[in-house]
Image (cartoon, rainbow, N blue to C red):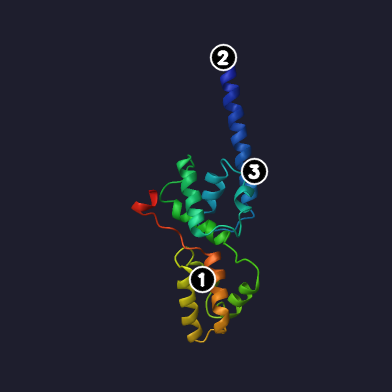
């Protein structure tokens, strides 16, 4: 009797895992191919529906995705340290952070995107302060970017808000 109950339990778990995997593969069919897709559709979808990942499209930066993946690994996700950067790259490319709408986005498109792909601008996510952005914009304007001097502060505000500088931990930060 006990043996039968154990066997039934094992079979139920197996069927549930098979159904979950089939569902994840079906959801994963709409994701773009690339390194990291299989990690996402197996390791992440083991606990989450893929919609729990895809709903954040346009919201997270590379650093945000990295932190989320590392947190999930600490919580038991079956992702090796070698797979972490592959998964983070895939998530960042597949669900890139979008620029918020507004006049500054139009300015960014007309002044910056004529020479730079959006990925170049996103690479600066977390590294520049408002003053740094303002300096970069001035240098680009001097090189021919079509932006009026009086609009530089507004674009610097927009970029520093969209891509805030990450705070670096220091010994005095805990005081």
The residue tagged with tag 3: helix, strand or loop? helix
Image coordinates for residue 155, horizontal then vertical, percent: 56, 74
In the image, which is nearer the foreground, mark 1 or mark 3?
1
In the displayed structure, 105 sits above or below 141; it is above
* Label 2 Cα crowd, 10 Å radius (few <14 / some 14-19 / many 20+): few
* Label 1 Cα crowd, 10 Å radius (few <14 / some 14-19 / many 20+): some
Number of the label disc, if any, that sits on residue 2:
2
Q: Residue at x 60, y 60 (%)?
A: 58
The residue under label 1 is: 121
In the displayed structure, 134 sits above or below 169; it is below
Q: Earlier in the sequence, mark 1 or mark 3?
A: 3
- Give the quadrant of residue 85: bottom left
Q: CA distance from mark 1 to mark 3?
A: 36 Å
**Contact between labelled residues 2 and 3, with CB atoms less than 8 Å apart:** no
The residue tagged with tag 2: helix, strand or loop? helix
Number of the label disc, if any, that sits on residue 34:
none
Q: Earlier in the sequence, mark 3 or mark 2?
A: 2
Q: Residue at x 48, y 40 (%)?
A: 75
The residue tagged with tag 1: helix, strand or loop? helix
Which of these two is toward me, 8 or 147?
Answer: 147
The residue under label 3 is: 23
């Amino acid at each position: 009797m006990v043996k039968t109950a154990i066997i039934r339990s094992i079979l139920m778990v197996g069927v549930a895992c098979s159904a979950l995997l089939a569902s994840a593969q079906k959801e994963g069919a709409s994701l773009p191919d690339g390194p990291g897709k299989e990690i996402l559709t197996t390791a992440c979808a083991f606990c989450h529906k893929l919609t729990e990942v895809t709903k954040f499209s346009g919201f997270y930066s590379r650093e945000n995705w990295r932190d989320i993946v590392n947190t999930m690994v600490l919580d038991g996700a079956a992702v090796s340290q070698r797979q972490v950067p592959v998964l983070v790259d895939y998530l960042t490319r597949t669900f890139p952070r979008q620029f918020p709408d507004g006049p500054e986005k139009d300015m960014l498109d007309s002044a910056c995107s004529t020479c730079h792909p959006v990925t170049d601008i996103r690479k600066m996510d977390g590294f520049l302060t408002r003053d740094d952005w303002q300096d970069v914009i001035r240098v680009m304007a001097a090189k021919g970017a079509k932006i009026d001097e009086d609009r530089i502060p507004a674009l610097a505000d927009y970029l520093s808000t969209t891509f805030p500088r990450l705070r670096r931990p220091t010994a005095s930060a805990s005081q």
